[in-house]
Amino acid sequence: MKKFFLFLLLSLSTIAFSQEDAWVYFNAKSNQQSYFDSPILMLSQRALERRTNQNIAIDFKDVPINPAYISQVKSVTGITVMAKSKWMNALHIRGTQTLINSLKGFAFVDKVDFANKTLNQAGKTAKVFKQKEQGKTRKIKIDYAYGSSDNQIKMLNGDVLHKQNYTGTGKIIAIMDSGFLGVDTTQPFQRLRNNKQILDGYNFVLRESNVYTSDSHGTSVLSTMGGYTENKLVGTAPDASYYLFITEDVRSENPVEESLWVEAAEKADSLGVDIINTSLGYFEFDNAAYSHTYSEMNGTTAFISRGAEIAFSRGMIVVASAGNEGVTLNPHIGAPADAVSVLAIGAVNSLETRVSFSSIGPSYDQRVKPDVMAQGVSTVLSNQFGAIVTASGTSFSGPVMAGMVASFWQAFPTKTNKEIRALIIESADRYTAPTAQYGYGIPDFSLALTLSVKDLANNYFVVYPNPTSDYISVRFPESFNKGTVVFYTVLGQKVLEREVSSPVDTFSLKSLSNGIYIYKIESEAFSKSGKIIKQ
């Protein structure tokens, strides 16, 4: 089977840029109290319910930009407004350096921030990790004919969720991408269309409603979550609903795409979206003066990363591809994967080994990144013509994970985004020993289900990961004092014994040969046993 690696060819322009990109920030908003008194004016009922369920208050960021400020900026001849953000209380504008600086004369302007940082007083080759073109009846228990998409789901134990009817029902995912050619006509998306699971979309680049245009990268991304072709492709959240947003301009790489992404995220928030998936990442731009540096991958500098963090503060989960730069001179994750609360997803192959192109961590401020991993080599998906093909890149490991997040959250609808994110990370196979290459590793959604059952907190213990190739963790009830873990062969021969005295302990099984073992855990309060696979 061919492997298609998605390395973005960077285009470095040699022409002079007389027009500059910048953000102009305002120092106030108008009619704030009226919006606080009637929040339905700025957020849908579903969005308000998400805030209520997670105890998130309406605040200044939710209030729209004062339209009078926008009008006055637009009235300056030679200034073009490219995007707007109520969260940042800012406009993305384009014009000459002189004209942009002249906006500081408005009393309502707080500051101007040029994309070319050398122009500021007091970037990025945007990487859509783009795909190369290549050739309802509900049941109590579901057994999907995954076909060739079997591995990318079962690697995460996602089939355990699906068999319990956790398939994303009731959850909404917004996809930020470069285009969705074929989604409106081809077979793998027929189930979504028939069930009206594609709720709407918008092309922020062209400012029009048609999203079935421009590019097919978003098509393939959507197919890993919502696609359905029996015995060939089943997405990780086949019963979730979707908004399709174009924020990436395939014609060029410019910081305005970060601003369009934030604008789309604000729209997603207002619509009550639960999860944002993005396979877009930004580091360098066509104009090298706009490019980011590794020192800016700190979660608080890039416009898109700040927007992603605000999205999380509104109760959504943002799932971002880590990037495909692992073998370049700048191998680290880009924006918005660097944001603190974003789930940054790296890529492994079908054998759960990290692939070299997957961007690495840590973030510049030494946080663990990527966060977790999923299959990003020979990922099974649909192209724009409806053919079930494979492609490789974190572009696809990201949405594979995003769909699983939706299915998992369906199982625990009262949990907050913070709780869901934490449980996913805690279930990963390198949780106790994260690395710059794997982050916390590959999540186990079956384990995450177990960890989520809070009412068993005083009665359960967990051994994970299972299977394991080396380290194993044992989690005891909070009331645990001390005990012993003993491993036996299936013939009853004792091969390993370990005393434990804390609620969570981790130790190595490296000395054991591959095979099936019986473990027995004993303490003063209880005795439990089970099987574990060493592989």
Image (spheres, grey):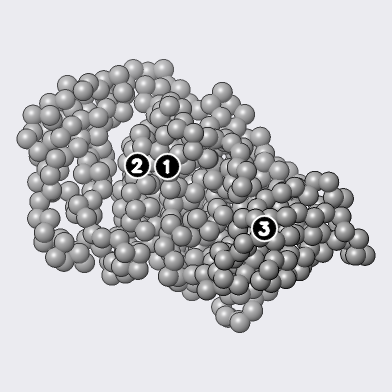
Query: Could you tell me residue 304's position as x and y percent?
Result: 37, 41
Dot in front, 1 or 3: 3
Q: Amino acid at mark 3?
A: Val
Residue occupying the point 19% across, 52% down: 60
Vertical side of 231 occupied by 264: above or below: above
Q: What residue is pinned by disc 1?
A: 339
Are the residues at dot 1 and dot 3 in contact (C-beta closer than 8 Å)?
Answer: no
SS for callout 2: helix
Vertical side of 365 occupied by 496: above or below: below
SS for callout 3: strand
Q: What residue is pinned by disc 2?
A: 306
Q: Amino acid at mark 1?
A: Ala
In whole angstroms, how far apart are the C-alphas of marks 1 and 3?
Answer: 31 Å
Query: Could you tell me residue 210's position as x and y percent?
Result: 38, 55
Q: What residue is pinned by disc 3?
A: 474
In whole angstroms, how far apart are the C-alphas of marks 2 and 3?
Answer: 37 Å
Residue occupying the point 9% across, 46% down: 68
